[in-house]
Structures are given as structure tokens and as C-alpha cells.
Amino acid sequence: MSDRPTVEQYLKNIENGDFKAYKCQECGAVVAPPSDACYSCGGTNMEWTAVSGKGTLVSYTVVHVSSDEFVAEVPYYVAIVKLEEGTSITGRLVGFDPLKPEDLEIGMDLVLDYQKGESGKTYLAFREP
Ligand SMILES: [Zn+2]
């Protein structure tokens, strides 16, 4: 059986609280969310790689109108976080007051976490270390 990463397994890993990214075997770039080709070199030879879960805040927005799994929790933050492995992923920011954006600072340290939506499905999230 091939250990080639699949989107299906990527989502399953998140569901299991065991996030893994893809690692390009050509250039070593870490890729997430899943892509058929390396963001960096276009290579398609990928393997799973564990990440530290540490990252920094790149950008964020406040969601006021949600039709998704977290509709009961609006307003809330959604952030883009750059992992120390170099790739950026999107997830909710938890543990911060969405009415106090002054508590957030671009470049601040965050760690990967998980959160369940109303359906019980697990999503990536970030919180203070
Ligand atoms: Zn590559």
C-alpha cells in the first residue's frame, strides 16, 4: 500500500487530532493544505510530515455572519497562521475576545489546536501557546 498523502487522510488526521502536512521529497518544502503539486518547486512526490504546531499570526478577520458549523459562536476570528515549517494554514482563533482586536498582534506566537463544529466534525484552530 502506498503511503502517498491523500486529502481524505489529511482530513482524517485532523479528525483524529493528529494534523500532518505534506512534505515535498524534491525540495523539502512543507505543504498544507493539501496540494497535488509542491507550492515551491511543482514536484508531486509528497510524503507525510509531522509539524510542531507552532506558528505566527499572519492575518485575521472577524466573522460576523456564518452559515457554517460555528454559527452559534459568531462573532469569531478566523486567522491565517504561518507554521514554523513555512506553510500557512487557516483556522479559527480561540481564546481571544473578537471585540478586542487590540489583543492580537501580527507575528504573535500561536499554537495549533482543534475544535469541533456543531456536527461534531473537527476543525483546525489556533490559540495562545
Ligand atoms: Zn518542492
Image (tube, grey):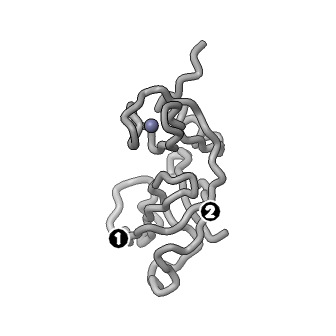
Label 2 crowd bin: few (<14), some (14–19), many (20+), radius 10 Å = some
Q: What residue is shown with label 1?
A: 64
Q: Which mark is residue 126?
A: none
Please tell me which residue is depicted at 60% across the width and 57% down the height of the picture. 112
Q: Quadrant of residue 44?
A: top left
Neighbour class for label 1 at 10 Å: few (<14), some, many (≥20)? few
**Image region (quadrant) for ligand 1:** top left
Q: Amino acid at mark 2?
A: Val
**Local SS, label 1:** loop
Left/right placement of residue 63 relative to residue 5 reads left
Compute the Cα span from label 2 to label 1.
Answer: 24 Å
Earlier along the polypeptide chain: callout 2 or callout 1? 1
Q: Nearer the viewer, mark 2 or mark 1?
A: 2
Which residue is farthest top?
A: 1
Q: For this rendering, which residue is in front, 36 or 67?
A: 36
Residue plotted at (53% across, 66% down): 56
Q: Residue at x 56, y 47 (%)?
A: 122
Q: Is residue 61 left or right of residue 86?
A: left
Q: Quadrant of residue 48?
A: top right
Whether ligand 1 has any atom under 8 Å from the Cβ at mark 1 is answered as: no
Residue underneath mark 2:
111
Q: Residue at x 53, y 44 (%)?
A: 121
Amino acid type, callout 1: His
Residue 89 image offset from top left, x and y in percent: 46, 53
Q: Position of residue 105 (x, y in %)?
A: 49, 79
Q: Residue 36 placed where, x, y %?
A: 39, 31
Q: Quadrant of the N terminus?
A: top right
For the residue labelled by badge 2, is the local secondary structure a helix, a strand or a loop? strand
